[in-house]
Amino acid sequence: MSLSKYQEVLDFWFKESSSKDHWAKNDEYDQKIRDRFLVDVEKAIKNEYDDWQDEAKSSLALIILLDQFSRNLFRNDPKSYSQDTKARLLVTEGVDRQYLDELETSEKFFYLLPLIHSEDLQDHIYLHQLGEVFLKNNPNYEHIKKSWNDHTVVIKKFGRYPHRNEILNRKSTPEEIEFLKGPNSSW
């Protein structure tokens, strides 16, 4: 395992990037990730970084590559969601290995994030349970819970995220089309 490589991912995400960088759609920031980490994302996709699963911090870096960077690198492309299953498996394995006990509060949030990206309601339920245990001391927890609840309401109503339909070549229902016209209908 390359300590310097996974630490580079963590330093970029937690030290060099702002919260605004994490959530805003920004071509310049996406390009920064592409320039520095595209090769690493490709290696992670090819399972070349699977040894990163063996420790909490490196597992977090792998989740960031697969769950976060893939969304920046492949925005509006089905590839942006192609690693979601693997990222969710990393979360459940890491929880079983008690990795969350070794992470800082902000790191725990991003460790758990693949569960809210899931279109499986059981993942959302699990996330809310984990949040109550591991994130309740986060000063932004009430805001986080509200955001997670908003996501979960969409999954309960539609069984999927309608804003992904066009990207994933799925046919939207009339109810989904109407929903997408409103505010806060995509993330």
Image (tube, rainbow, N blue to C red):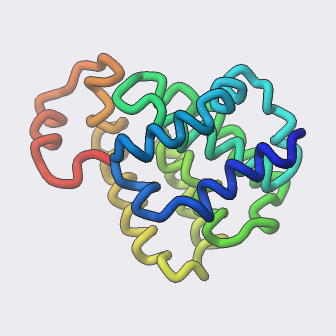
Report the residue at 71% width, 20% height from top: 46
Toward the viewer: 79 or 156?
A: 79
Q: Quadrant of residue 144?
A: bottom left
Q: Quadrant of residue 16?
A: bottom right
Q: Where in the figure is residue 97, as x and y percent of width and height?
A: 85, 53
Query: How many marks overall?
Result: 0
Report the residue at 37% width, 68% height from top: 146
Q: Where in the figure is residue 94, as x and y percent of width and height?
A: 77, 50
Toward the viewer: 129 or 61?
A: 61
Q: In this view, does 163 lie to the left or right of 133?
A: left
Q: Where in the figure is residue 69, as x and y percent of width and height?
A: 54, 40
Report the residue at 61% width, 68% height from top: 106
Q: Where in the figure is residue 32, as x and y percent of width and height?
A: 50, 42
Q: In this view, does 86 lie above or below 9?
A: above
Q: Is residue 42 left or right of residue 141?
A: right
Report the residue at 79% width, 25% height from top: 48
Query: Dividing the image into 4 quarters, which one contains the N terminus?
Result: top right
Q: In this view, does 113 lie to the left or right of 31?
A: right
